[in-house]
Image (cartoon, grey):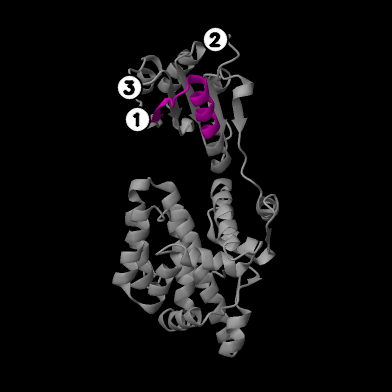
Amino acid sequence: MSGNTKHTPRVHLLLGPETGEKGARLKEIRGALRTEFSADPEIYRFYPFETLNGEIFTALQNNSLFSEHRLVILSQAELLQSSQIKELEAYLEEPSDSATLVIISSETRVSQKIASRVPKSQTKIFWEMFENRKPEWVRGLFSRSDFAITGDAVDMMLELVENTTQELRATALQLMQFVATEHRATVTEDDVERFIQHTRQESVFSLFEHMATGSYERALDILHTLIRSGDGDPIPLLAGLLWQFRRLVSLEELLAEGHRWDDAVNAVSVMGKTVAIKRKKDLGIYAEAVKRYPLRESRSIIAAIGEYDILTRQMGSDLHSLLLERLLGRIMVNKGADPAQLETLSFATDAKF
């Protein structure tokens, strides 16, 4: 590696499960290169399966006609084969000065042959934030900008927004702008719900509405709209549906226990937090949902959403659309039951959520 200390280090190793901070660090590296070369670097992205024949080294070692420097990103480094590790080890002995290599893994360690050849100063592990620290972290985002946020609003954010620091930070900024237009400086639970429900033409709320009222074709249209618009990321979308169906289960359990409707809608809770159903429109939606999905079926749906959450995390993004379509059909047509396993529903129906 060059002894010139003025330029950006040419190799970085970014490890760990926290994608938001890792993404922010990658942006910093790109920004430093832009400053150093007075222009954006040419960017190449590789996964191990895309460089089985050494394609990444062509990008690293061959000068570009279009830019002075290249930023080469290698993701999922934990999946590198032994032959790839050997080639990368050789490259790291003498990395090119005309390219910057960023090696990324969601694991906290990679092959020692790679790790030992990246200086400690250019290696960083991004640990996932402990669940019990996230509420305080969210409150800090608002307080640093002279905004307040209620505890219920924090809880709802953590339920409905993907729990990466990147997504939470982006949503916090949008919420602050949202309440500032109303000349207020405190974000409430109602603000979070209104923002997510009304700032987009379609959202997980409008999807649930049509799932509750039984319009399968309209629900499918909304799902496709969310996917096309970029709001169909399965992790936050499934989290939003899970929250809505947990709210429905709580309502149905209260009704099954003999509570009057007016009392039940005010006592509904999700994960131990009261989330009363207050708006006239929402009351109508949940009344329809109670008719369409009896308690046993609602519990089956929660189990199905959990299964598909695991599947979407395991499978490639090219299959996410198909998986979400299958889940929608499973919920609306089969009421949560797996059509291939209609006789084995004990887990779904007996589990308590």
| Main secondary structure type of the part rendered in magenta | helix
Q: Amino acid at mark 1?
A: Glu
Which residue occupies the extreme left position in the image?
Answer: 217
Dot label at residue 50 = 1
Give the quadrant of residue 261: bottom right
The magenta-colored residue range is 26-45
Q: How busy is the neighbourhood of tag 3: few (under 14 within 10 Å), some, or many (20 plus)?
A: few
Q: CA distance from mark 3 to mark 2?
A: 27 Å
Residue bearing the label numbered 2 = 2
Quarter containing the C terminus? bottom right
User: What residue sits 60% from the left and 60% below the top?
Assistant: 180
Q: Earlier in the sequence, mark 2 or mark 1?
A: 2
Is 84 situated left or right of 250 in this image? left
Q: CA distance from mark 1 to mark 3?
A: 8 Å
Q: Amino acid at mark 2?
A: Ser
Dot label at residue 53 = 3
